[in-house]
Amino acid sequence: MTGLQKFAKKVGWGHLILSTGLFSGFAPVASGTFGTLVSIPLYVGLMKLGAFLPAGWMQWMPYAAISLVLFLLGCQGANRIEDASQEKDPGIIVIDEIVGYLITMAFLPLRWQWIIAGFFVFRFFDVLKPYPIRSLDENPNLKGFGVMIDDALAGVYSNLALQVAKFLIERFA
């Protein structure tokens, strides 16, 4: 049995695959960046799914529901991986980046310019970790929730920045 198989037996294959972003978390460098890249096709797919629904807030219901489910599953998977690895927020966990990017892109148009801007703005806030993100990230009592919430908040900050940019572009372009 390989090391990965032993680890998966402790964590569960489903949690391992989901929490590592289809194993992108095992990238030798910048696993968070690779995890964020994995979220782009998911974002596009969710946007295309919403296009089949009536215009307005209903289009965002599957997007919001799937993002919430991924957040909750990410909390559970991060708990399991932290317990199995005996590490706090190991780099292989990238479901937090995936959810953070989905939050970043909520209510933005499906255009490549926004996809790229969202990627860089999210990575900026994810690395910078402005208040109160860093304190949540460093709190050992939050376990898997702490792993997920810091990137979710980075996604909120990123989304707000992009919404302001979108407003200014639409207003003054």
Image (cartoon, rainbow, N blue to C red):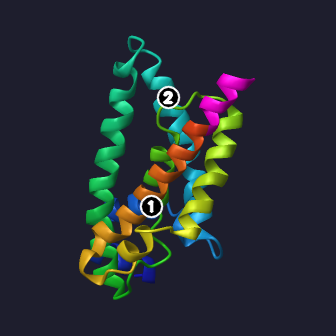
> What secondary structure prevails in the magenta region?
helix
The reply, left or right, for residue 44 in relation to residue 46 is: right
Segment colored magenta: 165-173
Identify the residue at image location x=55%, y=59%.
35
| Residue 157 rendering spot, x and y as whole percentages | 49, 52
Q: Residues within 10 Å of mark 1 (few under 14, many from 20)?
A: many
- Location of the N terminus by quadrant is bottom left
Question: What kind of element bears circle 1?
Answer: helix
The one of 143 and 108 positioned closer to us in this rendering: 108
Displayed quadrant of residue 58: top left
Does residue 98 appear in the picture of this structure?
no
| Residue 114 rendering spot, x and y as whole percentages | 65, 37
In the picture of the structure, the residue carrying the numbered disc 1 is 151
Question: What kind of element bears circle 2?
Answer: helix
Q: Is residue 169 magenta?
A: yes
In the picture of the structure, the residue carrying the numbered disc 2 is 47
